[in-house]
Structure formats: structure tokens, C-alpha cells
Image: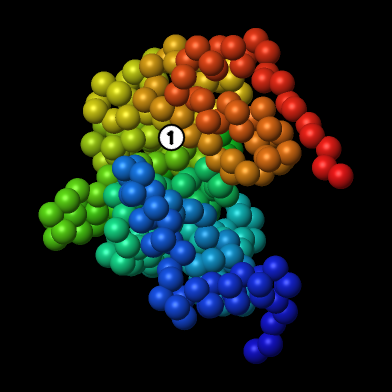
């Protein structure tokens, strides 16, 4: 059927079509550029799948996965369907695994990052969730508070099962190419991870991850590193970077670096000065005391 495409969507579609018609795949160009600098390139997969968002036919909101398969939707406590896929369904896990396989086989990536922090939750009150909870505890989870830890841990069970399957897939593909794929996960903090169904502690304990991106106390950071898993702290200020140094993190990560709503944009030049010098503690300490001066030159 017909659908409306916004001007920016049409421009992106034409731009990508022009490049691909010339044999230029934007992702591969970016990978080659990063590798030329001697840096690894990991492919991030956003884990939340909403109804009108990719994956799906480019520019067509009715061809998103959830729109095409409404039976995989999450359900609210009262049974209201949500326009979002639930990882309690093997069909959803299989589909996302197929995307990861496609990227890992089709591009020269060094690893995969599971981006969990945009759009949780990932499991609701679907039929298999209710059935599993009743088998385990003899109760209906819909009658319990969302903060009930047993409910949270059941949600986390499906997500952990998926992370195990990703690690298994990457091991299989890595063995074929003769070089290991790394697996990382972008999460929240130990205080909030479980609420969103992210049992990061179990992932680390089982050796599923090579690195974690997120937040946490010094004790949490050190516990992760003690299990041969690197820790990269999410940050937004010079003070946060200094705290990361104190905790012994392996590095730093920034989400949506170019978005002005987080104060990182080109409109705030001193932020970019900090971004470029995060690996230099003395300069970051100086930035924390006083941001670099901004020089403005009027053009006539």
C-alpha cells in the first residue's frame, strides 16, 4: 500500500541508493577507515524493536517487524498489546540473531555490541512469561508489583538466554574465519540493570562478555575486571571522567555524541575539546576546574 515518506527519509534513501549503485557500502567504508587508523570496529545492534522502526523495509512504517508480526508484541499487565517485540518469544531472538549473523558474515567487524540502553523493557506479561512464572512460583506475575525481584529475574532469564545464544553464534562464526569476535554490552548500572531485565552480573560471571559499557561503583568496576572483562564508563562531564580514572575503568564511552540535548554538540565547542582529550588525565583535571575558552571569529 501507499505510505508517506518524510523529505529527510527520502533524501537518505536516495543517498544510500546512489552509493550502493556505485558499489559503495557506507558501513564498509567506515569500517575500512577505522581499521586504517589501527582501531577495532564493533557493530552495535539496538536491542529494542518498536513497531515502526527498523529492522524493516526502509522508509515504510508498515513493514517493521512488529507491524508484520503482531503476535510477538509485548503485553502490559492488563493485556494491552505494546508496539514492541518481546524477547520471551524464540522467534524474536532468532530474528535478531539472524541480523547479527548477517552483519558478522558480511562485514569485516571485530565484534558486536548489544545496545540495551535505548528502549527497555524487553519482556512484558506475555503468555509464556505468565506460564513460566506460574510453573516456578505458583502465582500470577500480573498480580505482583513491577519491583518484585522474582518478576524481574524471570524477565532477565529470557534476555540472558539470548546473550548466551549471541556468544555461541559469535564463537561459531569466529572459528570459521579463524579470528575471535568480541562481544560487549551497553547497560545501565547495578542498581537499575535488573529492573530492565539486564542481568549483567550473570553475563560476566559466565564469561559471555569481553567488555561492558555503562556505569557503576568502583567495587562493581573492579568485580567486572576481576573476571577478565573490560569496563568502559559512560560519561558526560570532566568530573565523570575523573571519577572513572579513580575507579580504574579501561576507557570511556559516549552515547549520541553529536546530539545537542546532551550538551555534546558542535554548538558547545568546549565539550568537543574534552572529548578529544579524555585519555589525558592532567588536561581533564584542568577542564574540570575551568572549561577551555571559546574563541569566536565573526565572518563578514
Q: Residues within 10 Å of mark 1 (few under 14, many from 20)?
A: many
The answer to whether residue 294 is visible is yes
In the rendered structure, the answer to whether residue 164 lies left or right of residue 28 reads left
Q: x%, y% of residue 167? A: 26, 49
Q: In x, y percent, where is residue 119?
A: 57, 49
> Residue shown at 34%/49% (left/top)?
36
Q: Which residue is drawn at 45% across and 40% down?
A: 186
Q: Is residue 32 left or right of residue 172?
A: right
The residue closer to the viewer here, 152 or 138, is: 152
**Which secondary structure, mark 1?**
strand
Q: Name the residue under label 1.
A: 213
Decide if residue 118 is on the left or right side of residue 201: right
202 vs 219, nearest the viewer: 219
Give the residue drawn at x 50%, y 25%.
278
Most extreme residue toward the front is: 300
> Residue at point 26% right, 41% down?
208
Amino acid at each position: 500500500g501507499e505510505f508517506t515518506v518524510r523529505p529527510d527519509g527520502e533524501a537518505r534513501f536516495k543517498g544510500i541508493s546512489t552509493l550502493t549503485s556505485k558499489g559503495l557500502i557506507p558501513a564498509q567504508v567506515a569500517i575500512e577507515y577505522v581499521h586504517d587508523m589501527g582501531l577495532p570496529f564493533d557493530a552495535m545492534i539496538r536491542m529494542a524493536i518498536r513497531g515502526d522502526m527498523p529492522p524493516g523495509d526502509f522508509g515504510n512504517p508498515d513493514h517493521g517487524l512488529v507491524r508484520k508480526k503482531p503476535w510477538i508484541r509485548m503485553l502490559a499487565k492488563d493485556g494491552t498489546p505494546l508496539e514492541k517485540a518481546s524477547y520471551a518469544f524464540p522467534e524474536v531472538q532468532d530474528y535478531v540473531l539472524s541480523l547479527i549473523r548477517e552483519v558478522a558474515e558480511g562485514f569485516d567487524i571485530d565484534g558486536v555490541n548489544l545496545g540495551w540502553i535505548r528502549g527497555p523493557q524487553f519482556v512484558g506479561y506475555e503468555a509464556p512469561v505468565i506460564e513460566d512464572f506460574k510453573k516456578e512460583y505458583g502465582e500470577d506475575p500480573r498480580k505482583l508489583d513491577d519491583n518484585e525481584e522474582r518478576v524481574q529475574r524471570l524477565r532477565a532469564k529470557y534476555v540472558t538466554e539470548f546473550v548466551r545464544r549471541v556468544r555461541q553464534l559469535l564463537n561459531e562464526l569466529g572459528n570459521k574465519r579463524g579470528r575471535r569476535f568480541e562481544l560487549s554490552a551497553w547497560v545501565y548500572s547495578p542498581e537499575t540493570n535488573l529492573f530492565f531485565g539486564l542481568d549483567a552480573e550473570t553475563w560476566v560471571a559466565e564469561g559471555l562478555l569481553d567488555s561492558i559499557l555503562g556505569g557503576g561503583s568502583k567495587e562493581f568496576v573492579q568485580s567486572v575486571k576481576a573476571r577478565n572483562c573490560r569496563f568502559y564508563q559512560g560519561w558526560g562531564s570532566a568530573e565523570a571522567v575523573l571519577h572513572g580514572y579513580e575507579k580504574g575503568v579501561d576507557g570511556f564511552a559516549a552515547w549520541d555524541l553529536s546530539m545537542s540535548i546532551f550538551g555534546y554538540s558542535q554548538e558547545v565547542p568546549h565539550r568537543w575539546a574534552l572529548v578529544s582529550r579524555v585519555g589525558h588525565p592532567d588536561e581533564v583535571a584542568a577542564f574540570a576546574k575551568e572549561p577551555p575558552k571559546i574563541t569566536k571569529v565573526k565572518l563578514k
